[in-house]
Image (spheres, rainbow, N blue to C red):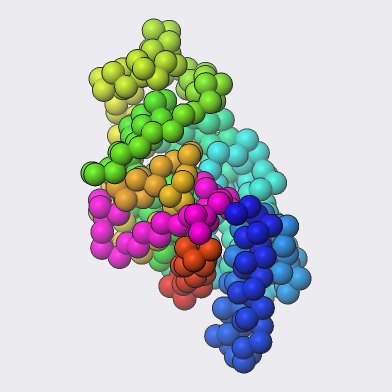
């Protein structure tokens, strides 16, 4: 099922809601359903844009961070959007589209640029822009983290300076363990308890990653990690510097310090970050944590579900997630 098919299916759901009695709760649900249609169709269907005015974008004054604010005419609940890999940071078109869509859905959205995620080289100091942005937001704030942006988002949510400001954190295709994510990225292998799997990554993508992080590796290490057959052995015994860095970038290490409600949404066919990472994070902090595994998402975009019945079930689950963000945030 591709994006147009997902859009048609969601449009049926939306049409059903339109003929329901128009009450406040029903209107909110309608807005959330319209948001989901537009998000999963990557803007090919635009029901929320048709229902709402375009939000305004302005620069936020945040010390130590470069941040934009997206807000509709009537304001909304405070939300921080933490992007994944995005060369343009907050100015990346797909990041701007997501921020605008969230603002149309009734959120006051702050979007910091995460410097490391503009270059494919996440570092511990990339947590600081999230912490600084959260420090300017009222409590409770919703945090939406996309892909590897879940790392700095979750680490910030555990930071004692701002953790009480976070009400709900939604991770979309995020990770728990930096060593496991690195192993998956270089070897294609993933595992959590009884779950095992392997995917084949494009060699040029692996080479790009190693070049972006070349400052951490000597030439023999780069050569070994570029070969999936040798990478596993090399990763089993990383240098102290690499081991320390990976530990610092692992949200599972500090998950017990997070006070927010966690909602972990993951596509079961995700080839960029395996869904086992959401299971791993939930095991590290099971209280007030919900895992939503779906087939209608690949990584952070619409995928091909295995059957219509499962697609409907997935869409209902995602609609509840989106609707619950405002209620719990």
Q: Is residue 137 visible?
A: no
Q: Is residue 237 magenta?
A: no
Q: Residue at x 62, y 68 (%)?
A: 10
Q: Residue at x 30, y 65 (%)?
A: 288
Side of 34 relative to 280 (left or right): right
Q: Nearer the viewer, residue 98 or 162?
A: 98
Q: In which quadrant will I find the N terminus? A: bottom right
Answer above or below: position of 50 versus 153. below
Q: Residue at x 56, y 51 (%)?
A: 303
Residue 195 sits in which quadrant?
A: top left
Q: Nearer the viewer, residue 322 or 96?
A: 322
**Residue furthest top in the image:** 220
Side of 194 relative to 54 (left or right): left
Q: Position of residue 324 (x, y in %)?
A: 46, 72
Q: Position of residue 163 (x, y in %)?
A: 36, 58
Q: Position of residue 210 (x, y in %)?
A: 48, 20
Q: Is residue 30 visible?
A: yes
Q: Position of residue 238 (x, y in %)?
A: 29, 20
Q: Residue at x 26, y 63 (%)?
A: 287
Q: Is residue 301 magenta?
A: yes
Q: How many marks?
A: 0
Q: Nearer the viewer, residue 129 or 211?
A: 211
Q: Nearer the viewer, residue 74 or 320?
A: 320
Side of 244 relative to 214 (left or right): left
Looking at the rendering, the stretch of residues picked out in magenta corresponds to 281-307
Residue 189 sits in which quadrant?
A: top left
Q: Main secondary structure of the magenta part?
A: loop
């Amino acid at each position: 099922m591709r994006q147009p098919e997902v859009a048609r299916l969601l449009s049926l759901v939306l049409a059903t809601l339109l003929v329901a009695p128009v009450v406040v709760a029903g209107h909110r649900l309608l807005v959330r359903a319209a948001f989901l249609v537009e998000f999963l169709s990557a803007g090919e269907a635009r029901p929320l844009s048709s229902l709402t005015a375009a939000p305004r974008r302005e620069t936020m004054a945040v010390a130590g961070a470069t941040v934009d604010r997206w807000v509709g005419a009537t304001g909304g609940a405070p939300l921080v959007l933490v992007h994944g890999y995005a060369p343009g940071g907050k100015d990346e078109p797909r990041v701007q589209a997501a921020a605008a869509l969230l603002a149309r859905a009734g959120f006051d959205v702050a979007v910091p640029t995460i410097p490391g995620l503009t270059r494919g080289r996440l570092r511990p100091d990339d947590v600081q822009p999230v912490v600084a942005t959260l420090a300017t937001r009222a409590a409770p704030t919703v945090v939406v983290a996309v892909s590897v942006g879940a790392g700095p988002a979750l680490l910030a949510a555990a930071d004692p300076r701002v953790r009480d400001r976070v009400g709900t954190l939604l991770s979309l295709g995020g990770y728990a363990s930096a060593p496991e994510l690195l192993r998956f990225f270089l070897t294609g292998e993933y595992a959590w308890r009884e779950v095992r799997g392997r995917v084949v990554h494009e060699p040029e993508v692996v080479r790009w990653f190693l070049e972006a992080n070349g400052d951490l590796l000597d030439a023999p290490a780069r050569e070994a990690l570029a070969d999936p057959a040798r990478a596993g052995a090399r990763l089993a015994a990383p240098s102290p510097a690499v081991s320390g860095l990976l530990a610092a970038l692992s949200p599972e290490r500090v998950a017990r310090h997070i006070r927010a409600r966690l909602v972990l949404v993951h596509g079961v066919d995700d080839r960029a970050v395996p869904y086992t990472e959401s299971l791993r994070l939930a095991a590290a902090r099971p209280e007030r944590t919900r895992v939503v595994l779906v087939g209608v998402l690949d990584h952070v975009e619409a995928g091909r579900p295995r059957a219509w019945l499962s697609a409907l079930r997935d869409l209902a689950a995602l609609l509840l997630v989106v609707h619950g963000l405002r209620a719990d945030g």
